[in-house]
Image (spheres, rainbow, N blue to C red):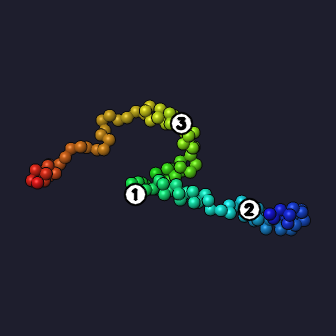
Amino acid sequence: MFGPYFSPVIHRSQFENVAHLIEILLLFRVSNATVERGFSAMKRIKTDWKSRLNEVTIDHLLRISIDGPAFSNFDPRPAMEKFFSTPRRPDVAPYGSRKRSHSALDTESDA
């Protein structure tokens, strides 16, 4: 667009900073389609059911959604192999202790 104005060497040497600024400005996108795709991806990821996700998890899920491979090209086998090859701690309950306190038992028996 501005190429005819800055193609001669004379003009470019006279206005070197302006020419450099225009080259930088030409790199900016004119549309906001990328931003809109990002908001759409966030709307898909952060639903009412997932509203308690922390920022890091949302960031990772958005990066996968926007920049990740297409679902048809994704092969889950390497991730599954890594997950199943990682040793687990069998002595740790996944959700903490399942023991109930005596006060909780007393209130249930009173009801």
Residue at image position (54%, 42%) is 71
- Structural distance between the alpha carbons of marks 2 and 1: 40 Å
Given this view, does label 2 or label 3 mark the residue nearer the observer? 3
Asked if the residues shown at circle 2 and circle 3 are in contact, with their CB atoms under 8 angstroms apart, the answer is no
In front: 64, or 21?
64
In the picture, measured across the screen, residue 10 lies left or right of residue 47, that is: right
Q: x%, y% of residue 42?
A: 50, 56
| Tag 3: amino acid | Asp
Horizontal arrangement in the rendering, residue 88 relative to residue 2 (left or right): left
- Comparing 63 with 92, the one in front is 63
Position of residue 108 measured from the top left corner of the image (x, y, whole percent): 13, 51
Image point (48%, 57%), residue name:
43
Q: Amino acid at mark 2?
A: Leu
The residue under label 3 is 75
The disc at residue 48 is: 1
Which residue in the protein does label 2 denote?
26
Q: Name the kind of residue labelled 1 in the image.
A: Asp
Marks 1 and 3 sit apart, C-alpha to C-alpha, by: 29 Å
